[in-house]
Image (cartoon, rainbow, N blue to C red):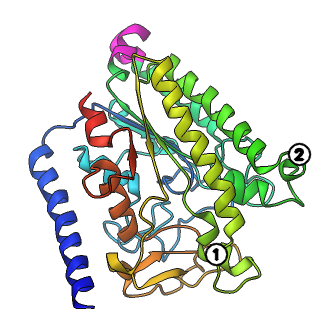
Amino acid sequence: MAFKAKSWLILHLLLLLAYFMQHCVYGEFTQVPCLFIFGDSLSDSGNNNNLQTHAKPNYKPYGIDFLKGRPTGRFTNGRTSIDIIGQLLGFKKFIPPFANTIGSDILKGVNYASGAAGIRNETGKRNVGDNIALGLQIKNHKKIVSRIAAKFGGLPQAKHYLNKCLYYVNIGSNDYINNYYQPLLYSTSHIYNPDQYAKVLVNQLSNYIETLHEVGARKFVLVGLGQVGCTPHAIATSGKPGLCAEKQNIDTLIFSHQLRSLVDKFNIQHLDSKFIFINSTAGTPDRSLGFKVLNAPCCPMGLDGMCIRDSKPCSNRNQYIFYDGFHPTSALNNITALSSYNSVFNPKMTYPMDIKHLAQI
């Protein structure tokens, strides 16, 4: 027990040391000129706030550990993984959501992510409400590219600038949680077996990535899916109390394997670009990292998996993996971000390189 406690302490000290060293070195300069974020609730920073949807965390206890302790539209108690990655890259301010880009510096990047969104347009809409699907996120990005082109005096000049920026894509969980596993509302599970469905999703995602490439994107971070069957909501609704819904884990792992193969394919096809894969199932968090509660939410959870409005969350949030029924705490986001940014913390997390080295290319 003493050895485990000491290992946990050393690891966290190393993580904190890397974080503060990064800020000391890169406090004045960013490693990439801009960061564009595409995805779902794991990255959303407020795009859903004005939508007609249940996937809208603009109330307490969300955001209790974020800046002034106010909810912002982030589906966690503090910062998301991409918030932290942005800071590690040297950005002083968080990348603004597309919904709030008026008056903000779009040359630093934009966050297009939307809670409950998926690769497929219909995902999440029949059971959760409105969202900004990946296809619309891409269209929104094209609008931003036009505005950047106007600032630089033309599209060729804008593309030259965007070639140096980082494009982060973390999406796909809802295509399972809020589509494939909702057979009464969506037809996908009746049409496709898990292998076929993963292929359909990756092919559609591939087309969207090609579109981003056409408008200047050259540095891509593609994030695989986590163990969706081990979220508190999945466990609570699986019919097997205390046990992960393993079929969901197996199905989503098929998607992640195909996504990694897509990274290999793109790196061969696009020699002017670089693609990396983040393995979200590498090094499953456990008690060795200081977490004591592995599969229960920190906040009181409603039937939809969200925190109950104005409820009181746990006080020991750094010891919880999940904040609500689906989303990680900022404590886990910190570890995920640092491991994605610098592979020294978890060599199996990134392929074929980490975000730090991608930014330097």
Q: Which residue of the protein is positioned furthest toward the bottom in this rendering? A: 1
Residue 224 pos. (x, y %): 53, 49
Dividing the image into 4 quarters, which one contains the N terminus? bottom left
Visible residue check, residue 173: no
In the shown orientation, is residue 133 left or right of residue 183? left
Visible residue check, residue 185: yes
Q: Given the image, on which type of amino acid does mark 2 rest?
A: Ile
- Which residue shows up at 39% across the image and 52% down it? 349
Q: Earlier in the sequence, mark 2 or mark 1?
A: 2
Please tell me whether residue 98 belongs to the stretch shown in magenta.
no
Instruction: Name the residue beneath numbered marker 2.
Output: 191
In the shown orientation, is residue 98 left or right of residue 359? right
Q: Given the image, on which type of amino acid does mark 1 rest?
A: Cys
Instruction: Name the residue beneath numbered marker 1.
Output: 244
- Which residue shows up at 17% across the image and 70% down it? 13
Residue 350 pos. (x, y %): 38, 46
